[in-house]
């Protein structure tokens, strides 16, 4: 793979950032030197060219492929021009779980709300070093409803994008891989189990408490 990942968690965590990230604008499909992506979703609340992107050309570091412990994946987010002319985000994650199953989630920006609307499918997907392709019935959310999902992504080799990692080291093949940092060690302060006695009162200068009696539960 052109960008081997150290953990699948990095890929999943990256997708969790899509709601607040805005990236490079599309450059046009003709003569595209970056990644080329087409995608669409169709549901009761998401139909027509507002929910379709055809041959959007984006920076080669906006979408990428990888492999973790035998699980191939394609993931990314970019700003693209939709078929109805509006500009918005397009995000996706496609992961091959095993030889017979893949999970794909596509997020498209609703121009009316500027929020990402997602649709996912477990239909068979072709995922590899050069991109990912999937098409089939699935579920859209929100709201929860039946949907169809389509993704056709052609990958161009590039290093890990800035939004995926801030520290990289050469892997010897001309690309870069993210470095992992061990979590800081933590210590828990000692907690005493000694409970102060309530059978007597402390002495207070100037006050005679010798006749005071404590009643348990009072």
Image: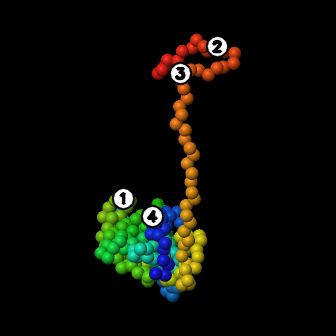
Quick check: 150 left or right of 59? left
Q: Identify the residue position indicated by label 4 in the image.
A: 116
**Mark 2 or mark 1, which is nearer the start of the sequence?**
1
Q: Residues within 10 Å of mark 4 (few under 14, many from 20)?
A: many
Q: Identify the residue position indicated by label 1 in the image.
A: 143
For the residues marked 1 and 3, what is the alpha-carbon distance in whole angstroms? 62 Å
For the residues marked 3 and 4, what is the alpha-carbon distance in whole angstroms? 63 Å
**Mark 4 or mark 3, which is nearer the start of the sequence?**
4
Q: Position of residue 76 (x, y in %)?
A: 48, 72
Q: Residues within 10 Å of mark 2 (few under 14, many from 20)?
A: few
Q: Identify the residue position indicated by label 3 in the image.
A: 199
Q: Position of residue 4 (x, y in %)?
A: 48, 77
> Element type at marker 2?
loop
Q: Is residue 28 above or below residue 17?
A: below
**Mark 3 or mark 1, which is nearer the start of the sequence?**
1
**Depth check, front residue: 146 or 212:** 212
**Depth check, front residue: 39 or 175:** 175
């Amino acid at each position: 793979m052109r960008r081997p990942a150290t953990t699948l968690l990095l890929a999943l965590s990256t997708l969790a950032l899509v709601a607040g990230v805005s990236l490079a604008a599309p450059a046009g499909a003709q003569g595209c030197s970056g990644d080329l992506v087409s995608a669409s979703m169709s549901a009761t609340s998401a139909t027509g060219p507002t929910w379709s992107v055809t041959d959007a050309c984006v920076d080669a570091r906006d979408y990428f492929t990888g492999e973790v412990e035998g699980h191939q994946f394609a993931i990314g987010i970019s700003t693209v021009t939709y078929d109805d002319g509006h500009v918005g985000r397009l995000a996706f994650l496609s992961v091959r779980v095993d030889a017979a199953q893949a999970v794909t989630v596509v997020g498209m920006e609703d121009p009316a709300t500027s929020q990402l609307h997602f649709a996912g499918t477990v239909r068979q997907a072709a995922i590899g070093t050069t991109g990912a392709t999937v098409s089939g019935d699935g579920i859209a959310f929100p709201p929860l409803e039946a949907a169809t999902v389509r993704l056709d992504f052609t990958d161009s080799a590039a290093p890990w994008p800035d939004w995926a990692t801030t520290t990289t080291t050469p892997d010897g093949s001309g690309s870069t891989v993210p470095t992992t940092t061990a979590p800081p060690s933590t210590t828990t302060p000692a907690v005493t189990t000694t409970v102060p006695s309530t059978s007597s009162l402390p002495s207070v200068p100037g006050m005679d408490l010798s006749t005071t009696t404590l009643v348990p539960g009072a």
